[in-house]
Image (spheres, helix red, strand yellow):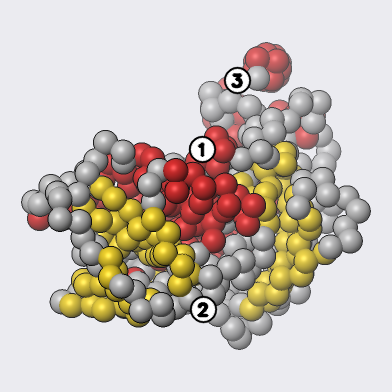
Amino acid sequence: MSISKPASKKRLIVIVGEGLHLAISAAYLANQTKHLPLSFVAVNLDTEEVKNGDIGATFPPFEPAVSPILQRQLKVSPLTHILLNTAQSSDGFKFNFSSYGVPSETISFSQGYEIYKENTSQQYRFDAFLDARQEQKNGFTYSRNWAKNIYQKMAVRQGVCFVPASNIEVNCVNGSIKHISTDNNQSISGDLFIDCTKSQKLIGCLQTPRKLPESIVPRWTTQVKKITDAENKTSNYTISFLDSAIQVEACCDAGKEEYHYNFSQTGETAHYYENPWTNNCIALGNCFKHLPEVLISAEKSLSNQLGVLPWLLDIDNSQIDLAYHQKRFNSQAINQVLEEIDSLNLLLSNCKGVELKLTEKNQRRVQLFSSSANTIKEDNTFMSESAWAGLLHASGVKPKGVNLTARAVNKEKITTLTESLIKKN
């Protein structure tokens, strides 16, 4: 049996993957491109289902804190903060969903830090004066398998055809995918192929990944432990930094899981593909990169890419138009993954026994933050400036002073303005 491009002017998009990422991609793209002459086939691989655990989370340091795709559809288990247990903050450092320091972009971190020095003696908590404020429940943990079933039903209602398979073979000609063959003797051809596989089955046939130096992100092994007899199933997300390891505890209504990442110079190597959109293949989510999922929400990364993809699919046969859309998509995806690498690199500096050097951007951030309580505002919005301030503070980098703007503003005026903002929010 073969599935070929339709005889009409409709273009066929073939999505290959497994689990939640396949279901989200199929449902979202089919719904957002209803005005375009497109049809969708989803090849559902069952070999990699829930390999890395079932519990997912949306959380800072990304803005907005909640993936808009997930937020609209899921019944959530509220997550109000992430707790970081580091050598510098043995009692834990809370990432607050409302903000870090002050609940408004109109007041800088420097000004918030000035208030902190006057209002708390806890050196690791610069946002302690917000404790009286009711935290916004903007984040949540959830069962990926449960969410997958919801999105798969949504995709079917949008006309997506699901094809089950255990394995596929990819046939490439001149740097493009011609067709894929399943172990069920099905041949599927299309105008565009979207790779949502964890093992990067499609994009890996077209290009070689760029490996990260082990001095930036060391090799690692991952162990997942399901705790079935957990008494407290309150939604939480806790990251603990151990000797040469990071342990993550995630809990939701469906249960509790522990993820243990061991950075002992053996195991998996971090890498990414420099062109996630190559010819007629697009790699989404974790498909075009391979990093430990610590503070990196896989579904949030996918959501960012899906947010721009529908209008990029509205292309004609012009090669100039296609090249522009590919460049735009690839530029955004690479900016995102480089920020993820920076945040992971900064967090790993909390692990004893892990030898690494900070990335060039992190070195500049540390120098600027320690001297003036400011960070570098990069030219993208995947991570906010205040989020970098929170990460640096949690990593033990303490500002020695504040900028002239903060010093020039009267303390009582800042406090009054902050309290009024708290009441408004």
Q: Residue furthest bottom?
A: 266
> Dot 2: few (<14), some (14–19), or many (≥20) neighbours within 10 Å?
some
Residue tagged 2: 269
Q: Are marks 3 and 2 in contact (CB under 8 Å)?
A: no
**Measuring 67% from the left and 60% from the top, which residue is drawn there?**
54
Q: Is residue 366 at all visible to an observer of this figure? A: no
Q: Nearer the viewer, mark 3 or mark 2?
A: 2
Q: Is residue 226 left or right of residue 383?
A: right
Percent from the top left, x then y, of residue 68? 51, 38
Q: Secondary structure at mark 1?
A: helix
- Residue 31 position in % (x across, y down): 38, 40
Query: Height in image: 193 above or below 388?
Result: below
- Residue type marked 3: Val
Q: CA distance from mark 3 to mark 2?
A: 48 Å
Of the numbered discs 1 and 2, the one sitting upstream in the chain is: 1
- Dot 2 lies on which element? loop
Are the residues flagged by discs 1 and 2 in contact, CB closer than 8 Å?
A: no
Do residues under tags 3 and 1 come within 8 Å of each other at their CB atoms?
Answer: no
Amino acid at dot 1: Pro
Badge 3 or badge 2: first in the primary sequence: 2
Foreground residue among 143 and 208: 143
Q: Which residue is mark 3?
A: 409
Quarter assignment of residue 288: bottom left
How far apart are labels 1 and 2 at the CA level?
31 Å
Dot 3 crowding, Cα within 10 Å, few <14, some 14–19, many 20+: few
Query: What is the C-alpha distance between the residues marked 3 and 1?
Result: 37 Å
